[in-house]
Structures are given as structure tokens and as C-alpha cells.
Amino acid sequence: MDQTSTSAVYLRFLNLLNAIERDSGVPELEANERVLLDMLARRWHQGKPVTVLEAMNSGVSGMSPSTVHRRIKSLKASGMLRAENDTADSRTKYLVPTDQAMAYFDRLGDCILKTQAV
């Protein structure tokens, strides 16, 4: 395969992502967890808080609400997410990235910047 083709670039990116996950101390993410975390990261980047209920009903990648809830629980258990109560309504919980998640995003961003410089 031509190493400059678009597909080769994408495959190198996937290999890089796997290497980062292996070497960064971040727990290995399942595909559904990665998709959910990516969706949450986009919302956080836009300055939009996400409640657990909103995430569950987002239909991200066709996941059922119960699947999303299980993935939220596993991301919380792995230290990538935490839930914070709304100050006005304690029944509402917002999903918030942990320092570990932010370090993971920083590491991915650094790698992207380095590959652009090459």
C-alpha cells in the first residue's frame, strides 16, 4: 500500500491511537466507550454541559440508553468521567471529564500536532 495514501494515513492514525492508549496509563477503551467519550468531548469543547440523561438519550452510534448507561458506568470506574450534581436540582447529574480524561485528550492533541509537522 502506498504510504502516502489517505487510507495509509488513517491506518497510521489508528496505530498511533492504540499506542497512546497502551502507553499513556489510560485504561484501554472499548469501541463504544471511545465513541461516547468522543461525543462528550465535542460537547464539552462547545461549552455545553451534558447530563447523564442527555447522554443516555443521545442515540450516539445507535447505542440504546441502557448501553450508554453501562458505558458511562465503566468510564467512571476507569477514572475517565465523574458525575456532579446540579446545584439547583440534585436529581440532575452532569458528566464531567476527569484530569485523566483531559490528559488523554492532551496527549492525542500533541500527537496530531506532531504528525502535522512531519
Image (cartoon, grey):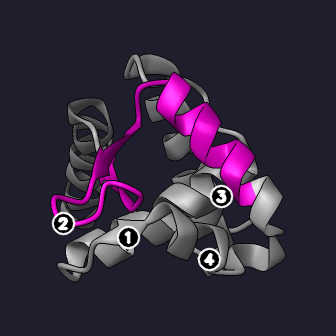
Sooner in the amino-acid sequence: mark 2 or mark 4:
4
- In which image quadrant can residue 80 be found? top left
Q: Which mark is first along the chain, 3 or 4?
A: 4
Residue at 27% x, 70% y is: 44
Q: Amino acid at mark 3?
A: Leu
Residue placed under numbered mark 2 in the picture: 88
Residue at 62% across, 80% down: 58
Q: How many marks?
A: 4
Disc 4 target residue = 5
Give the structural element (helix, strand or loop) at label 3: helix
Label located before the other in sequence (1 or 2):
1
Question: Could you tell me residue 106's position as x and y percent?
Answer: 21, 46
Tell me the mark number nearer the camera, choosing from 3 and 1: 1
Where, by quadrant of the figure, is residue 116 drawn?
Answer: bottom left
Q: Nearer the viewer, mark 4 or mark 1?
A: 1
Residue 103 higher or lower than 71, as above or below: above
> Can residue 108 be spotted in the picture?
no
Q: Quadrant of the N terminus?
A: bottom right
Check disc 3 and report the residue beneath it: 11
Residue at 20 percent of width and 33 percent of height? 99
* Residue stretch in magenta: 68-96
**Marks 3 and 2, how far apart at CA:** 46 Å
Q: Which residue bears the numbered disc 1?
A: 50
Q: Which amino acid, by three-letter code, is at mark 1? A: Val
Residue type, label 2: Ala
**Can residue 77 be seen in the rendering of this structure?**
yes
Q: Amino acid at mark 4?
A: Ser
Q: In front: 84, or 96?
A: 84
Residue 2: x and y in percent read 68, 68
| 65 sits to left or right of 38 | right
